[in-house]
Image: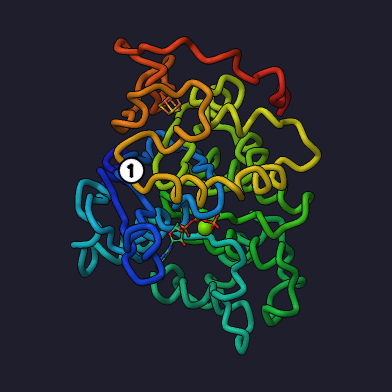
Amino acid sequence: MSAREKQIVLSNVTQIFRGAAFRQIGGELIAVDDVSFSLTAEPPQIVSLIGESGSGKSTIARIILGLQRPTSGSVTYGGKDIYRLAGDEFAFFRRDVQPVFQDPYGIFNPFYRVDRIFWTAIKKFKLAKSDVHGRSMIEESLAAVDLRPEDVLGRYPHQLSGGQRQRLMLARVHMLRPAFIIADEPVSMLDAAVRVLFLNILIDFKQTYGMTTLFITHDLSTAYYLGGDAMVISQGRIIERGTVDDVMLRPAHPYTQLLLSSLPVPDPADRWKERLAVTEQTVQSVSPSRDRCLFAERCRFVLDRCWKSRPEPVLVRQGQTASCFLYGPRSDHAQPAESPSQNARTTR
Ligand SMILES: Nc1ncnc2c1ncn2[C@@H]1O[C@H](COP(=O)(O)OP(=O)(O)OP(=O)(O)O)[C@@H](O)[C@H]1O
Ligand code: SF4
Ligand SMILES: [Mg+2]
C-alpha cells in the first residue's frame, strides 16, 4: 500500500452503550455520535482530539484501533473495513497503527524486564536478522527518545519512572515505524518537563519519519504546543475543527469560545475540568432528546431552531468548520460576540 493510500477514514461512527446504568437517560448512552473524519499518512499530520472527561475520546481511540466495533458507521484503513481485515492485512494494520496510552504501566508485565516489549515486537514482526541486530535496533530506538540503554534495559517496570515507561512505549513505536500513532492522553500523568520532551518526540516522529499522530487530550495547552489540526468533541459530537491556531485563537463555536474564555490560567487543564464538571449531567437531565444542539441550555445565542434540529458542520473560514446555526447561509442569528482570542496564548 502506498503512503498516499494509507488513510484511516471514520464515516458516521456511532457508539451506543446500553444497560441499566443508563436508565435515567433512556436506557442508553450515545458515547460517540455520528463522527466522521480521516487521518492521512501522506502528508503526515498531528491532529488533536480535544474534549472534556466522558466526551467520547477514548471510545473513538478504541474504535480506530480495532478494539471495539462501533454500533454503526465504518472505519476503513487503506479503503478496507478494519473490522474485516484478516491474516496478513490485519497484521499489517496492527503494526501500522500503534497505540500509546495514558500510563503504559498496565501494558508492561510486572514480572518481566522491560526489554521484553522490544523483543516481542522484533520477533512478532521479524524485524531483526540476529540478536545483535535486534539489540542495536533497540539501542537506536532508545536514543531516538532520549533514553540511555543502561538506564532502562534489564529493569522491571516498577523500577522506572512514569516518564521513562512512557518513552519506552515511544521507543517501541520508533522501532515499528507505524504510519499512525493513536495517543490517548499520553502525557496527562507526566510532569511538565517530561511532557514537553514527549511532545517534542511526537513532533520529531512526524518530521523525521512521517508518522501521523491522533493526539487525544483534555488539555488545551498540550494541543496548542503540538500545533497541527484540532477537533473539539463534546458529548460524542465533534463540534468544531480546523488548524490549532484557528480553533484556539479564533474559535467559532460558542462551546469552544466558552472553553477558551478562561485562558490563560496557571493550569488550563484544571480550569477545563472544573468548568466542565457541571455540564454533561445537567444537559442530559434537562432534555434527553439529542435531535438538537446539545449546547443549547448554556448558549447565549440560542434560538428556536437550536432545540429542533442538530446543527451540521458549516465552513466558517478556510479549513475551519463549526456545527452551529450561527454560521452558514440560512443563519438567522446575530454573529457571536468577539472571539476570546485576546485571552488565548499568542506564543508557542
Ligand atoms: N464499555 C462501556 N460501557 C458503558 N459505558 C461506557 C463504556 N465505555 C465508555 N462508556 C461511557 O461512554 C462515555 C465516553 O467515554 P470515554 O471513555 O470515551 O470518554 P473520554 O472522553 O475518553 O473521557 P476521559 O477524558 O475521562 O478519559 C462516558 O460516559 C463513559 O462512561
Ligand atoms: S447551534 Fe444554537 S445553541 Fe448550539 S451553539 Fe450554535 S447558536 Fe448555540
Ligand atoms: Mg479517555
> Which residue does the numbered mark 1 point to in the structure image?
290
As drawn, 187 above or below 344: below
Q: Residue at x 64, y 20 (%)?
A: 340
Q: Residue at x 32, y 63 (%)?
A: 27
The residue lying toward the viewer, choosing from 96 and 144, is 96
State the image quarter where residue 339 is shown: top right
Q: Is residue 108 left or right of residue 160?
A: left
Q: Residue at x 46, y 27 (%)?
A: 242
State the image quarter where residue 105 is shown: bottom right
Label 1 amino acid? Arg
Q: Position of residue 299 (x, y in %)?
A: 51, 28
- Split into 4 quadrants, where in the image is the C terminus? top right
State the image quarter where residue 23 is shown: bottom left
As drawn, 8 above or below 163: above
SS of the residue at dot 1?
loop
Q: Position of residue 48 (x, y in %)?
A: 52, 41
Q: Position of residue 234 (x, y in %)?
A: 47, 42
